[in-house]
Amino acid sequence: MGKKFLWMLGGISAVALLCGSVSLRAQRPGPTVYVALWFDTEDYILPQSAEAAKRIAVLLRQRDIRATFKLVGEVARSYERSNRTDVIAALSHHEIGYHTNFHSQHPTLAEYLEPLGWEEGVAEFDRRERPGVELLRKMFGALPTAFGQPGSSWAPQIYGGLRKWGSPVYLDAMSHVRLNGKPFYFGGILNILESEMAGSIRPNEDFSNLQEGKNKFSSLYERRMAEGGGIISIYYHPCEFVHKEFWDKTNFAKGANPPPADWKLPPLLSPEDSEASFRHFEQLVDYMMRFPRVKFITASDAAQLYRDTAQRRVYSRRELADIAEQVDSDITFQIYPNYTLAPSEVFSLLTFYLAQQISERSNAAITLSGTPFGPSSSAARLSGPQEIPWGQFFRTVLEVEATLRKSNKIPSVIWFGSTPCPPESYLAAAAEMARLLLDGSEVPDVVQIAPATLTTEQYVADNDPRLWGWVIFPENFSAPNLMALGKLQAWTLKPALLSTSTRRR
């Protein structure tokens, strides 16, 4: 609801449109434009929405296109209640994602998570949303491969729940977190989100804007080809092909929460206009298929294309030295030719290396196993440099290592005896000590801890009324706690790189 046939960008390139013979697809290797088609399948009130989802699924299968259908748990239950095994069978040929358990019934996701901290929020998200996940797993025989929030009902605790479930992709459109319009990792999850408005392809009232949609796709295709390959993410709602107003706006707008007996059906499109909507979509899909370097993908395909090659990698001394060298008082992600590192991953690698060296353990391989989450709360920045005896620094590093291994989370405050320190300042000092050890130099008797800043916070939006403009929210809804927690999770943010092997196809 509220996201109207939008196009999202994510990293792609140029080759002029040639008229579309199939033989063009067998040209010499070159960049590929990956088109992710996905459908927020959310309406469990209007019966015609089920038929629309089936028709879209069949239409795409006839073209050998697999899309991602993000289902609401209650939608799946409605299919069971109405014995729509035909709809379930049609959707089974595609990939299934998850779009919350009840979508717009209050409290919505952001409403119930706003008052909660990190740990209790992750637990509450899991408690409320896992039943829908398990239903989809049972119905379709596999765990949903992607998640997306309803409307603009985003919260950072979602990522803790997705990690529990093993869902690898956050596939949606929102502006709470963004990274230059490209796919990125946040919370250890691949994010494919709207971060640059690329225009709407929703049919206008007289269905005269098909060419406008074609021109938009052609422009994005050429841009992505010029970039050497990447992704265009496109989404719809099946219900929009049959109604005039969103089902949830009719029933749950501005915080309303009527019982099921009082739910109202939204007004329908005329049969003629509904047919024109399907025809508009069909013609646009056929147009996209004509491009020589287009490949349609699902969420799990995207997870492979942008797989996190930093994980389970053995880091050499030379690589650790390079990682430590890049750390300064502005803490941010690091980019290398074949992998990227989030600040929390840098924190983890350098802490494990220091703990190994200063405790005189054997030189076991330093590997990265997962992305530590950010702190649960913020610590006050240092007002100025602090001097810490080497012996105390040594003991604190071992404490931090133990905390990382136990919780897989950056500590909110790091204590050097009686001196509290924010994790940013700890990391800057740890990197300097790692540089000395990797260079074979003597460590000092006193370690200086200085003010530092997590600069990746800039990619998480400040709390703003425009973030919470979804018509379903109560009037004047705001979620400053969620955005503050989101900035803490900026420790986990980094670019996602398109696999080198896929760029050479």
Image (cartoon, rainbow, N blue to C red):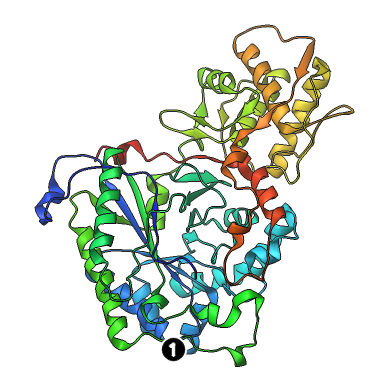
Q: Secondary structure at mark 1?
A: loop
Lateral position of residue 417 relative to residue 460, left or right: right
List x then y, in percent, for residue 274. Answer: 32, 82
- Observer-nearest residue: 129 or 481? 481
Task: Identify the residue at horizontal 27%, vertical 67% (top origin).
Answer: 209
Q: Quarter-wise, where is residue 469 in the image?
A: bottom right
Residue 95, visible in the rendered structure: yes
List x then y, in percent, for residue 154. Answer: 59, 59
In this view, the residue farthest toward the right is 418
Q: Residues within 10 Å of mark 1 (few under 14, many from 20)?
A: few
Relative to residue 391, is residue 180 depicted above or below? below
Tally of marks: 1
- Observer-nearest residue: 122 or 484? 484
Callout 1, which amino acid? Asn
Q: Mark 1 = which residue?
A: 83
Q: Quarter-wise, where is residue 86 in the image?
A: bottom left
List x then y, in percent, for residue 286. Answer: 20, 64
Residue 371, visible in the rendered structure: no
